[in-house]
Amino acid sequence: MKILTMGVEEEFMLVDRVSRTPVDRAPEVLASAGRVLGEQVQREFFNAQVETATRPTASCRDLRDELSWMRAVLGEAARTARCRPVATGTSVLPPTRPLTVTDTERYRRMARRYASHFGRVDGLVCGCHIHVGTLERDAALGLSRRMAPWLPVLQAITANSPYARSRDTGFDSWRSVEYARWPTVGPAPDLDEPRYLSRVAELVRTGTLLDRRMVYWYARPSEHVPTLEIRVADANADVDTVVLLACLVRGLAMALLPEVLDGRPAPRVPHRRLLLAHELAARYGLSGFGLDPRTGREVPAADLGDRLVDRARPGLDAVGDTGRALCQWRRIRARGAGAARQRAVYRRHRRLTDVVDSLAETTATA
Protein backbone atom coordinates (compact mmCIF):
# COMPACT_ATOMS: atom_id res chain seq x y z
CA MET A 1 0.00 0.00 0.00
CA LYS A 2 1.37 3.41 -0.98
CA ILE A 3 2.09 5.62 2.04
CA LEU A 4 0.74 9.14 1.53
CA THR A 5 1.87 12.25 3.35
CA MET A 6 -0.54 14.83 4.75
CA GLY A 7 -0.51 18.55 5.38
CA VAL A 8 -2.93 20.98 6.99
CA GLU A 9 -3.90 24.55 6.15
CA GLU A 10 -5.68 26.31 9.02
CA GLU A 11 -7.47 29.66 8.71
CA PHE A 12 -7.81 31.79 11.83
CA MET A 13 -9.97 34.78 12.66
CA LEU A 14 -8.35 37.65 14.57
CA VAL A 15 -10.55 39.04 17.36
CA ASP A 16 -9.95 42.01 19.61
CA ARG A 17 -8.93 41.01 23.14
CA VAL A 18 -11.52 43.32 24.72
CA SER A 19 -14.52 43.44 22.37
CA ARG A 20 -14.02 39.87 21.01
CA THR A 21 -15.04 41.12 17.56
CA PRO A 22 -13.04 40.59 14.33
CA VAL A 23 -10.37 43.22 13.73
CA ASP A 24 -8.13 44.11 10.77
CA ARG A 25 -4.76 43.37 12.35
CA ALA A 26 -3.38 40.70 10.04
CA PRO A 27 -0.53 42.92 8.75
CA GLU A 28 0.82 43.37 12.29
CA VAL A 29 0.36 39.69 13.16
CA LEU A 30 1.99 38.50 9.94
CA ALA A 31 4.97 40.83 10.35
CA SER A 32 5.71 39.28 13.74
CA ALA A 33 4.75 35.64 13.10
CA GLY A 34 6.47 35.64 9.72
CA ARG A 35 9.86 36.14 11.36
CA VAL A 36 9.48 32.67 12.86
CA LEU A 37 7.15 30.83 10.49
CA GLY A 38 8.29 32.35 7.20
CA GLU A 39 6.06 31.29 4.32
CA GLN A 40 4.15 28.90 6.58
CA VAL A 41 1.96 31.85 7.62
CA GLN A 42 0.07 33.70 4.90
CA ARG A 43 -2.44 36.44 4.24
CA GLU A 44 -6.08 35.59 3.61
CA PHE A 45 -8.89 37.41 1.82
CA PHE A 46 -9.73 39.73 4.73
CA ASN A 47 -7.28 41.60 6.95
CA ALA A 48 -9.03 39.95 9.91
CA GLN A 49 -7.72 36.51 8.90
CA VAL A 50 -4.45 34.63 8.62
CA GLU A 51 -3.61 31.13 7.42
CA THR A 52 -0.93 28.67 8.49
CA ALA A 53 0.32 25.65 6.55
CA THR A 54 2.19 22.66 7.91
CA ARG A 55 4.95 20.86 6.08
CA PRO A 56 4.07 17.47 4.53
CA THR A 57 4.47 14.66 7.04
CA ALA A 58 3.69 10.97 7.37
CA SER A 59 3.35 11.16 11.18
CA CYS A 60 0.21 12.23 13.05
CA ARG A 61 2.34 12.92 16.12
CA ASP A 62 4.64 15.23 14.16
CA LEU A 63 1.61 16.90 12.59
CA ARG A 64 0.11 17.64 15.99
CA ASP A 65 3.41 19.01 17.27
CA GLU A 66 3.75 21.35 14.30
CA LEU A 67 0.15 22.55 14.52
CA SER A 68 0.62 23.29 18.23
CA TRP A 69 3.89 25.12 17.63
CA MET A 70 2.45 27.28 14.86
CA ARG A 71 -0.57 28.17 17.00
CA ALA A 72 1.75 29.20 19.83
CA VAL A 73 3.81 31.43 17.53
CA LEU A 74 0.66 32.92 16.04
CA GLY A 75 -0.82 33.53 19.49
CA GLU A 76 2.24 35.43 20.66
CA ALA A 77 2.26 37.53 17.50
CA ALA A 78 -1.43 38.30 17.96
CA ARG A 79 -0.88 39.24 21.61
CA THR A 80 1.52 42.00 20.60
CA ALA A 81 -1.16 43.24 18.16
CA ARG A 82 -3.81 43.26 20.93
CA CYS A 83 -5.86 40.45 19.43
CA ARG A 84 -6.27 36.68 19.60
CA PRO A 85 -6.40 34.01 16.88
CA VAL A 86 -9.63 32.01 16.94
CA ALA A 87 -10.20 28.81 14.98
CA THR A 88 -13.90 28.79 14.17
CA GLY A 89 -15.86 28.70 10.96
CA THR A 90 -17.72 32.01 11.32
CA SER A 91 -17.53 35.18 13.38
CA VAL A 92 -19.55 34.67 16.57
CA LEU A 93 -19.87 38.44 17.03
CA PRO A 94 -20.10 40.92 14.14
CA PRO A 95 -17.26 43.33 13.42
CA THR A 96 -17.80 46.81 14.81
CA ARG A 97 -16.63 48.37 11.55
CA PRO A 98 -16.48 47.13 7.94
CA LEU A 99 -13.68 44.68 7.33
CA THR A 100 -11.09 45.47 4.68
CA VAL A 101 -9.91 43.20 1.90
CA THR A 102 -6.21 42.31 1.94
CA ASP A 103 -4.31 44.65 -0.36
CA THR A 104 -3.05 42.35 -3.11
CA GLU A 105 -3.89 42.56 -6.80
CA ARG A 106 -5.62 39.17 -6.81
CA TYR A 107 -7.80 39.88 -3.77
CA ARG A 108 -8.72 43.33 -5.10
CA ARG A 109 -9.82 41.75 -8.39
CA MET A 110 -11.84 39.12 -6.53
CA ALA A 111 -13.53 41.80 -4.42
CA ARG A 112 -14.49 43.77 -7.53
CA ARG A 113 -15.72 40.80 -9.55
CA TYR A 114 -17.70 39.17 -6.74
CA ALA A 115 -18.85 42.34 -4.97
CA SER A 116 -22.42 41.04 -4.69
CA HIS A 117 -21.24 38.47 -2.15
CA PHE A 118 -20.31 41.19 0.27
CA GLY A 119 -23.64 42.92 -0.03
CA ARG A 120 -25.51 39.82 1.14
CA VAL A 121 -23.11 38.07 3.48
CA ASP A 122 -20.21 39.14 5.61
CA GLY A 123 -17.93 36.67 3.82
CA LEU A 124 -15.69 36.17 6.85
CA VAL A 125 -15.39 32.38 7.05
CA CYS A 126 -12.50 30.15 8.10
CA GLY A 127 -11.88 26.59 6.97
CA CYS A 128 -9.39 23.80 7.49
CA HIS A 129 -8.01 22.12 4.37
CA ILE A 130 -6.22 18.77 4.24
CA HIS A 131 -3.68 17.83 1.56
CA VAL A 132 -2.68 14.23 0.84
CA GLY A 133 0.07 13.26 -1.58
CA THR A 134 2.20 12.80 -3.47
CA LEU A 135 -0.33 12.22 -6.27
CA GLU A 136 -0.45 12.80 -10.01
CA ARG A 137 -3.46 14.85 -11.07
CA ASP A 138 -5.29 11.91 -12.65
CA ALA A 139 -4.89 9.82 -9.48
CA ALA A 140 -6.07 12.77 -7.38
CA LEU A 141 -9.18 13.06 -9.54
CA GLY A 142 -9.84 9.33 -9.21
CA LEU A 143 -9.58 9.61 -5.44
CA SER A 144 -11.88 12.62 -5.48
CA ARG A 145 -14.61 10.52 -7.10
CA ARG A 146 -14.27 7.71 -4.58
CA MET A 147 -14.02 9.95 -1.52
CA ALA A 148 -17.06 12.07 -2.43
CA PRO A 149 -19.65 9.98 -0.49
CA TRP A 150 -17.55 10.27 2.68
CA LEU A 151 -16.95 14.01 2.62
CA PRO A 152 -20.32 14.92 4.21
CA VAL A 153 -19.31 12.76 7.19
CA LEU A 154 -16.03 14.65 7.57
CA GLN A 155 -18.02 17.88 7.31
CA ALA A 156 -20.30 16.75 10.15
CA ILE A 157 -17.40 15.68 12.38
CA THR A 158 -15.76 19.10 12.00
CA ALA A 159 -18.89 21.30 12.11
CA ASN A 160 -17.87 24.28 14.25
CA SER A 161 -19.85 27.38 13.27
CA PRO A 162 -23.31 27.51 14.87
CA TYR A 163 -23.13 31.23 15.68
CA ALA A 164 -22.76 34.15 13.29
CA ARG A 165 -23.33 37.87 13.86
CA SER A 166 -24.59 37.40 17.43
CA ARG A 167 -27.20 34.76 16.65
CA ASP A 168 -27.62 31.01 16.63
CA THR A 169 -28.06 30.21 12.95
CA GLY A 170 -29.79 26.88 13.53
CA PHE A 171 -26.96 25.20 11.62
CA ASP A 172 -23.97 23.37 13.05
CA SER A 173 -21.84 24.64 10.14
CA TRP A 174 -23.04 28.05 9.02
CA ARG A 175 -19.70 28.48 7.27
CA SER A 176 -20.83 25.82 4.80
CA VAL A 177 -23.86 27.95 3.92
CA GLU A 178 -21.90 31.19 3.56
CA TYR A 179 -19.07 29.56 1.64
CA ALA A 180 -21.43 27.84 -0.81
CA ARG A 181 -22.35 31.24 -2.31
CA TRP A 182 -18.97 31.35 -4.06
CA PRO A 183 -18.64 29.91 -7.59
CA THR A 184 -17.91 26.15 -7.84
CA VAL A 185 -18.19 25.46 -4.09
CA GLY A 186 -19.72 22.02 -3.68
CA PRO A 187 -19.15 18.37 -4.59
CA ALA A 188 -16.66 17.94 -7.41
CA PRO A 189 -18.02 16.81 -10.78
CA ASP A 190 -16.97 13.39 -12.03
CA LEU A 191 -14.07 14.27 -14.34
CA ASP A 192 -10.98 12.57 -15.69
CA GLU A 193 -7.88 14.70 -16.30
CA PRO A 194 -8.65 15.91 -19.86
CA ARG A 195 -12.22 16.86 -18.92
CA TYR A 196 -11.01 18.49 -15.71
CA LEU A 197 -8.55 20.68 -17.61
CA SER A 198 -11.20 21.55 -20.18
CA ARG A 199 -13.83 22.40 -17.54
CA VAL A 200 -11.49 24.60 -15.52
CA ALA A 201 -10.27 26.40 -18.63
CA GLU A 202 -13.88 27.10 -19.60
CA LEU A 203 -14.72 28.44 -16.13
CA VAL A 204 -11.78 30.84 -16.31
CA ARG A 205 -12.40 31.82 -19.94
CA THR A 206 -16.05 32.69 -19.28
CA GLY A 207 -15.20 34.76 -16.21
CA THR A 208 -16.97 32.42 -13.78
CA LEU A 209 -13.63 32.07 -12.02
CA LEU A 210 -10.84 34.59 -11.77
CA ASP A 211 -8.17 31.90 -12.13
CA ARG A 212 -7.52 28.19 -11.62
CA ARG A 213 -6.87 28.69 -7.91
CA MET A 214 -10.56 29.58 -7.50
CA VAL A 215 -11.70 26.01 -8.13
CA TYR A 216 -13.40 25.52 -4.76
CA TRP A 217 -14.78 22.01 -5.16
CA TYR A 218 -14.83 20.06 -1.90
CA ALA A 219 -12.10 17.81 -3.30
CA ARG A 220 -9.68 19.16 -5.90
CA PRO A 221 -6.18 18.57 -7.23
CA SER A 222 -4.01 21.31 -5.78
CA GLU A 223 -2.71 23.89 -8.24
CA HIS A 224 0.59 24.45 -6.40
CA VAL A 225 1.60 21.07 -4.91
CA PRO A 226 1.08 17.45 -6.12
CA THR A 227 -1.75 16.63 -3.75
CA LEU A 228 -5.48 16.10 -3.42
CA GLU A 229 -6.97 18.87 -1.28
CA ILE A 230 -10.09 18.25 0.85
CA ARG A 231 -11.99 21.47 1.62
CA VAL A 232 -15.14 20.57 3.60
CA ALA A 233 -14.10 21.29 7.19
CA ASP A 234 -14.69 24.30 9.41
CA ALA A 235 -11.69 25.67 11.25
CA ASN A 236 -11.59 23.95 14.66
CA ALA A 237 -10.18 25.28 17.91
CA ASP A 238 -9.61 21.74 19.20
CA VAL A 239 -6.32 20.67 17.62
CA ASP A 240 -7.06 16.97 18.13
CA THR A 241 -10.14 17.33 15.92
CA VAL A 242 -7.85 18.74 13.22
CA VAL A 243 -5.42 15.85 13.61
CA LEU A 244 -8.29 13.34 13.47
CA LEU A 245 -9.53 14.98 10.28
CA ALA A 246 -6.09 14.67 8.69
CA CYS A 247 -5.69 11.04 9.85
CA LEU A 248 -9.09 10.06 8.45
CA VAL A 249 -8.55 11.83 5.14
CA ARG A 250 -5.14 10.21 4.70
CA GLY A 251 -6.39 6.80 5.88
CA LEU A 252 -9.39 6.90 3.56
CA ALA A 253 -7.26 8.03 0.62
CA MET A 254 -4.78 5.21 1.19
CA ALA A 255 -7.59 2.65 1.51
CA LEU A 256 -9.19 3.78 -1.76
CA LEU A 257 -6.08 4.49 -3.82
CA PRO A 258 -5.52 0.85 -4.92
CA GLU A 259 -8.92 0.95 -6.65
CA VAL A 260 -7.79 4.05 -8.55
CA LEU A 261 -4.43 2.59 -9.55
CA ASP A 262 -6.08 -0.68 -10.65
CA GLY A 263 -8.46 1.25 -12.90
CA ARG A 264 -11.60 0.00 -11.19
CA PRO A 265 -14.69 2.16 -11.88
CA ALA A 266 -15.90 4.36 -9.04
CA PRO A 267 -19.41 3.72 -7.67
CA ARG A 268 -21.98 6.06 -9.21
CA VAL A 269 -23.53 8.44 -6.68
CA PRO A 270 -26.20 10.91 -7.86
CA HIS A 271 -25.01 14.50 -7.54
CA ARG A 272 -28.30 15.54 -5.91
CA ARG A 273 -27.71 12.98 -3.14
CA LEU A 274 -24.28 14.41 -2.44
CA LEU A 275 -25.78 17.91 -2.23
CA LEU A 276 -28.46 16.73 0.20
CA ALA A 277 -25.90 14.87 2.32
CA HIS A 278 -23.80 18.03 2.61
CA GLU A 279 -26.90 20.08 3.44
CA LEU A 280 -27.80 17.73 6.30
CA ALA A 281 -24.20 17.71 7.55
CA ALA A 282 -24.16 21.51 7.61
CA ARG A 283 -27.47 21.73 9.45
CA TYR A 284 -27.16 18.95 12.01
CA GLY A 285 -23.48 18.05 12.23
CA LEU A 286 -23.17 14.92 14.37
CA SER A 287 -26.28 15.69 16.43
CA GLY A 288 -28.95 14.43 14.05
CA PHE A 289 -29.43 12.29 10.99
CA GLY A 290 -27.22 12.33 7.95
CA LEU A 291 -27.68 10.86 4.51
CA ASP A 292 -25.68 7.93 3.22
CA PRO A 293 -25.18 9.04 -0.41
CA ARG A 294 -24.45 5.49 -1.50
CA THR A 295 -27.91 4.22 -0.47
CA GLY A 296 -29.99 7.40 -0.18
CA ARG A 297 -31.05 6.41 3.34
CA GLU A 298 -31.06 8.60 6.42
CA VAL A 299 -28.72 7.30 9.12
CA PRO A 300 -27.69 8.76 12.49
CA ALA A 301 -24.71 10.95 11.68
CA ALA A 302 -22.59 9.35 14.40
CA ASP A 303 -23.18 5.93 12.82
CA LEU A 304 -21.93 7.32 9.51
CA GLY A 305 -18.80 8.36 11.39
CA ASP A 306 -18.34 4.78 12.58
CA ARG A 307 -18.64 3.57 8.98
CA LEU A 308 -16.09 6.13 7.82
CA VAL A 309 -13.56 4.96 10.39
CA ASP A 310 -14.16 1.35 9.33
CA ARG A 311 -13.68 2.21 5.64
CA ALA A 312 -10.46 4.09 6.39
CA ARG A 313 -9.19 1.24 8.59
CA PRO A 314 -6.84 -0.37 6.03
CA GLY A 315 -5.08 2.95 5.50
CA LEU A 316 -5.03 3.73 9.22
CA ASP A 317 -3.59 0.29 9.99
CA ALA A 318 -0.86 0.67 7.37
CA VAL A 319 0.61 3.73 9.11
CA GLY A 320 -0.18 2.86 12.72
CA ASP A 321 -2.88 5.53 13.12
CA THR A 322 -5.78 3.28 14.10
CA GLY A 323 -5.45 3.63 17.87
CA ARG A 324 -5.15 7.42 17.74
CA ALA A 325 -8.04 7.77 15.29
CA LEU A 326 -10.35 5.50 17.29
CA CYS A 327 -9.54 7.29 20.55
CA GLN A 328 -10.21 10.75 19.13
CA TRP A 329 -13.30 9.65 17.23
CA ARG A 330 -14.82 8.10 20.36
CA ARG A 331 -14.07 11.30 22.27
CA ILE A 332 -15.86 13.45 19.69
CA ARG A 333 -18.71 10.95 19.39
CA ALA A 334 -19.27 11.20 23.15
CA ARG A 335 -18.74 14.97 23.58
CA GLY A 336 -20.11 16.21 20.28
CA ALA A 337 -18.39 18.19 17.58
CA GLY A 338 -17.27 21.80 17.95
CA ALA A 339 -20.73 23.24 17.30
CA ALA A 340 -22.23 21.27 20.19
CA ARG A 341 -19.43 22.43 22.48
CA GLN A 342 -19.95 26.09 21.50
CA ARG A 343 -23.64 25.82 22.32
CA ALA A 344 -22.83 24.13 25.63
CA VAL A 345 -20.64 27.10 26.61
CA TYR A 346 -23.47 29.49 25.77
CA ARG A 347 -26.00 27.46 27.78
CA ARG A 348 -23.71 27.66 30.82
CA HIS A 349 -22.91 31.38 30.64
CA ARG A 350 -25.59 32.94 28.41
CA ARG A 351 -22.99 35.26 26.88
CA LEU A 352 -21.54 35.01 23.39
CA THR A 353 -18.38 36.72 24.60
CA ASP A 354 -17.78 33.59 26.69
CA VAL A 355 -18.14 31.47 23.56
CA VAL A 356 -15.43 33.55 21.87
CA ASP A 357 -13.21 33.32 24.96
CA SER A 358 -13.63 29.54 25.06
CA LEU A 359 -12.71 29.24 21.38
CA ALA A 360 -9.67 31.49 21.81
CA GLU A 361 -8.45 29.59 24.86
CA THR A 362 -8.90 26.21 23.16
CA THR A 363 -7.09 27.49 20.07
CA ALA A 364 -4.20 28.67 22.25
CA THR A 365 -3.86 25.57 24.44
CA ALA A 366 -3.16 23.08 21.67
Image (tube, rainbow, N blue to C red):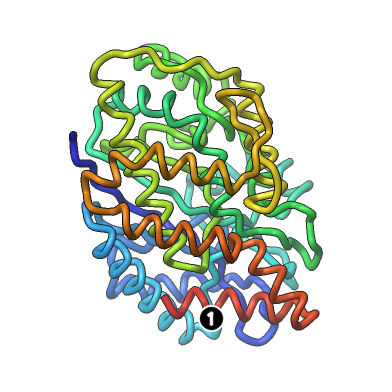
Q: Dividing the image into 4 quarters, which one contains the C terminus? A: bottom left
Q: Amino acid at mark 1?
A: Glu
Up the image or down, 44 lies above or below 97; here it is above
Up the image or down, 185 lies above or below 75; here it is above
Residue 43 seen in the figure: no
Quick check: 230 left or right of 54?
Answer: right
Position in image of residue 170 (x %, y %): 79, 54
| The one of 1 and 361 positioned closer to us in this rendering | 1
Position in image of residue 232 (x %, y %): 53, 44
| The one of 120 and 8 positioned closer to us in this rendering | 8
Q: Residue at x 74, y 75 (%)?
A: 346
Position in image of residue 262 (x %, y %): 24, 16
Up the image or down, 37 lies above or below 223; here it is below
Position in image of residue 150 (x %, y %): 50, 35
Q: Residue 338 is drawn in which quadrant?
A: bottom right
Kindly identify which residue carries mark 1.
361
Dot 1: element: helix
Q: Residue at x 55, y 52 (%)?
A: 157
Quick check: 32 left or right of 123?
Answer: left
Up the image or down, 280 lies above or below 128; here it is above
Quick check: 70 left or right of 262?
Answer: right
Q: Residue 295 is drawn in which quadrant?
A: top right
Q: Residue at x 38, y 15 (%)?
A: 192
| The one of 106 and 235 positioned closer to us in this rendering | 235
Q: Dividing the image into 4 quarters, which one contains the N terminus? A: top left
